[in-house]
Image (cartoon, rainbow, N blue to C red):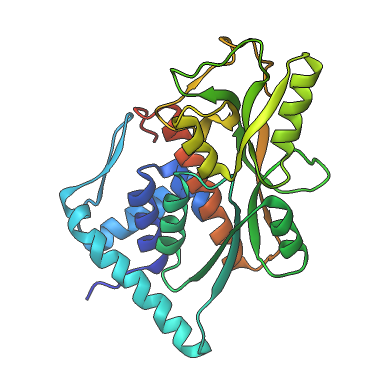
Amino acid sequence: MTALDVDGVRAFLMIADYRSFTRAAEALGITQAAVSVKLKRLEERLGQRLVERTPRQVRLSTQGEVFLPAAREFLAAHQRAIESLSGRRRQFRLGIASHVMGPEVPLLLARLKSFDPGLTLEVRLDASGPLLDAFDGGELDAIIIRSNDTRRSGEILGPEHFGWFAAPNFSCNPDDPLPLAGLSSCSAVRDTAMRLLDRASIRWTEVFIGETPAIAAALSAGLAISPFPVRLAPADVVDVSTVFGLPSLPSFTLVLHSSLSDQKTKESLRAITAAFREHRRMSDNPTRLTN
């Protein structure tokens, strides 16, 4: 009777999810060579080749596709068996700044659940300030925020680039103040943008105030210009920096702060980091396949 190795199955699932040995190793916190060894041992036990690997891509074999759902259930059953002894499910409390919430978050959550099927996720969306307060008060295990504060240490997920966005047909009277859309909550990006406009002697006035999704809608509707993350800009708006002679905006940093140090939480945090960075790579170069 063939006995499956839990670590081998977990490595296979990470490869299947990320389509990359490098990203799987990052999520598991081991070397790429170790991932390859775990997969090879699993394939030898099963007597089947599960993954096809070429210099350009990583994909599941026909047998790998067949094995995938059973592998997920095997790992979930293993986790349930462990939890049955403790009498409780492991909980992970994650805060995500509402102005950071983007298209990579569903992928991030799916990766977390795939990595730890028995995990109970609690996700809170809020402004960076309240999230930092909740994190400092022990209400959250980890937070993802946009930060330019170098006094706090954290895992850097990547840069957040900004531009001045508006609808393609947006126009305004050059004699009038520049109509802007700004965040309703305190925002370092808003403060920086307004300071740059003042320094460039560009008159401005806020004609729309709201949270990030509302601002995106206002831009699409042609109501105003806004300093907006390139990553989150709607498909129907354009950068109008050159057209209106607006100052360049600095990049900020997306940071993951965590408070817990147990091994299981570290594994969850690695899965978050790997998923976020993988999405950023795919967004920057959607045709690129990693190995």
Taking depth in this image into account, of 15 and 165 the one nearest to the observer is 165
Taking depth in this image into account, of 100 and 58 the one nearest to the observer is 100
User: At 29% across and 65% down in the image, what residue appears?
Assistant: 71
Figure quadrant of the C terminus: top left
Q: Is residue 177 above or below residue 189?
A: above
Residue 278 appears at what percent x and percent y? 46, 40
Residue 96 appears at what percent x and percent y? 59, 54
User: At 76% across and 61% down in the image, what residue appears?
Assistant: 133
User: At 25% across and 59% down in the image, what residue appears?
Assistant: 68
Residue 134 appears at what percent x and percent y? 72, 64
Q: Is residue 278 left or right of residue 75?
A: right
Residue 250 appears in the figure: no
Among the 4 quarters of the image, the one containing residue 12:
bottom left
Residue 290 appears at what percent x and percent y? 39, 34
Among the 4 quarters of the image, the one containing residue 113:
bottom left
Taking depth in this image into account, of 192 and 69 the one nearest to the observer is 192
Among the 4 quarters of the image, the one containing residue 259:
bottom right
Q: Is residue 248 left or right of residue 106?
A: right
Figure quadrant of the N terminus: bottom left
Residue 135 appears in the figure: yes
Taking depth in this image into account, of 206 and 83 the one nearest to the observer is 206
User: At 59% across and 29% down in the image, what residue appears?
Assistant: 226
Q: Is residue 78 left or right of residue 154?
A: left
